[in-house]
C-alpha cells in the first residue's frame, strides 16, 4: 500500500466511523496532539477531548442526516497528508479538509473542517480519488 | 523571534496583503507547492496559480468588504504550523484556518479555509494570541 493509499484509507475510516456513529472508531481516527476541528457553522474546537465530545454529540443525534463523501484529492508530503473531498449531508454539499499526520507509522487526523459550498447540487457519480503526490 | 512569533507574523502578513489588496504580497505569503484554498461558499482550489487567481479576483472587487482577524491560536510542530482565528468580513464571522509550512526557513501558507460561524456576533475586544506549542 502506498502512502497515499494509506492516507485515503484513513480518510475512508473517518467517514465509516461517522456513518456508523462509532465514537470509539472516531477516537482511533484522531491523533492525540495538535487536534482541531471546525464543524459547519461552529467555531474552532481545540484539543482531542473537545473534538471527540463534539462527535459524540453529533453522532448521538437521531436526526443526524446520512453523510457521503466524494471526489477525494490526496496530498502527501513526508509525514504530512491531507484529503480534500466533497461531503453531502442532508442535501447540502460541503468542502471538507481532512488533515492527517503520520504518527507511529499510521495516518491520524489532526484537523477537520467542512464548509458549505454555495449552489453545488448533488451529482450522481463518484469520481476516482486523485493522487497529487 | 520564536517559531510561533514568526508563524503569527506570517499570518499577519496574509491579512495585511488582503487588506491592502496587494496581490504581489499575497503571492509571497503562499508557498509554491501543495497549495489549497477554500473561500467561503467556494469549492476547494488546488495549486498556486488557481489560488492566486482567486485572490486577484477577490482583491480587485471594489465592493470587497474590509477584513479583520482576531483571537489567533497558533500550533507549531517542527516545520508544520497553523493559525486558527476568527475573521470578520462585512459583518460575518468566519472560522479561519491558515496552514503554513516552513520552506527555506520561512513560514509559507499552504492552505486557507474560512467557514461562516452561525450566530457569532462581532465583539469589541481583541484577545492576545494564544500559543499552544
Image (spheres, coloured by chain):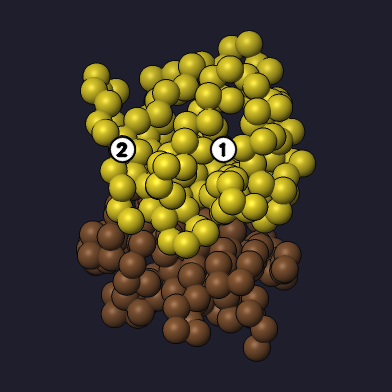
Chain colours: A brown, B yellow
Asked if marks 2 and 1 fall on the same chain, the answer is yes
Kindly identify which chain the residue marked by label 1 belongs to: B
* Left or right position of B133 against B83: left
Would you place residue A1 above or below residue B105 in this image?
Answer: below
Quarter containing the N terminus of chain B: top left
Would you place residue B68 above or below residue A104 in this image?
Answer: above
Residue drawn at x 61%, y 37% is B29
Residue B119 coordinates in the image, percent (x, y) = 29, 32
Among all residues in the image, which is located at the extreme front? B1
Residue drawn at x 69%, y 34% is B27
- Of A8 and A123, which appears nearest the observer? A8
Would you place residue B113 above or below residue A55 in this image?
Answer: above
Q: Which residue is mark 2?
A: B129
Residue drawn at x 29%, y 43% is B130
- Of B53 and B20, which appears nearest the observer? B20
Q: Secondary structure at mark 2?
A: loop
Residue B39: assigned label: 1
Amino acid at each position: 500500500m502506498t502512502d497515499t493509499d494509506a492516507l485515503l484509507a484513513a480518510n475512508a475510516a473517518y467517514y465509516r466511523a461517522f456513518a456508523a456513529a462509532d465514537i470509539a472508531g472516531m477516537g482511533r481516527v484522531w491523533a492525540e496532539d495538535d487536534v482541531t476541528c471546525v464543524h459547519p457553522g461552529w467555531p474552532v474546537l481545540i484539543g482531542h477531548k473537545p473534538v471527540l465530545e463534539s462527535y459524540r454529540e453529533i453522532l448521538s443525534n437521531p436526526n443526524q442526516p446520512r453523510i457521503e463523501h466524494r471526489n477525494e484529492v490526496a496530498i502527501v508530503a513526508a509525514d504530512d497528508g491531507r484529503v480534500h473531498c466533497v461531503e453531502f449531508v442532508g442535501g447540502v454539499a460541503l468542502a471538507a479538509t481532512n488533515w492527517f499526520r503520520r504518527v507511529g507509522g499510521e495516518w491520524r487526523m489532526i484537523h477537520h473542517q467542512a464548509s458549505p459550498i454555495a449552489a453545488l447540487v448533488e451529482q450522481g457519480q463518484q469520481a476516482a480519488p486523485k493522487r497529487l503526490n
